Image (cartoon, rainbow, N blue to C red):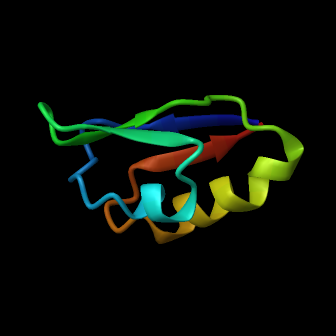
Amino acid sequence: MMLTVDLGLCQGHQECLAEAPELFDFDHDSYQVVVRITEPFEEQLPAARAAVKYCPAFALTLED
C-alpha cells in the first residue's frame, strides 16, 4: 500500500497527525503535511486508513 498526499489539496489541518503521528510530519514553513512513511507496515494500516478518512481536505490517498 502506498500513502500519498496531494499538496495542492492539503490545507494544514493536521488531522492526519492526530490519527497517525508515526506516519506523518508537518512542515511549518509550507504549512502542509509531510508523509514520513509512504509504505506503511500492516500494523500501521488502520491508522493510515483513519488519517485518509478524517482528512477534511481529502488530500490523502492509500492505494495498492
Q: In this view, does 17 lie to the left or right of 3?
A: left
User: Residue at the location (46% across, 64% down)?
Assistant: 18
Where does the image place residue 46, in percent across and percent down from the top left? 75, 61
Count of marks, rendered view:
0
Q: Is residue 2 left or right of residue 60?
A: right
Furthest residue to the front?
22
- Residue 51, compared with residue 3, is above or below; it is below
Furthest residue to the right?
42
User: Residue at the location (62% across, 29% down)?
Assistant: 38
Quarter of the rendering containing residue 5 = top left
Q: In this view, does 23 lie to the left or right of 35?
A: right
Residue 58 vs residue 19, the one in the foreground: 19
Residue 61 vs residue 26, the one in the foreground: 26
Q: In this view, does 5 lie to the left or right of 3?
A: left
Where does the image place residue 42, in percent across and percent down from the top left? 87, 45
Q: In which quarter of the image is the C terminus?
A: top right
- Residue 53, compared with residue 36, is above or below; it is below
User: Residue at the location (35% across, 68% down)?
Assistant: 56
Q: In which quarter of the image is the N terminus?
A: top right
Where does the image place residue 63, in percent across and percent down from the top left? 69, 40
- Residue 36, compared with residue 24, is above or below; it is above
User: Residue at the location (14% across, 33% down)?
Assistant: 30
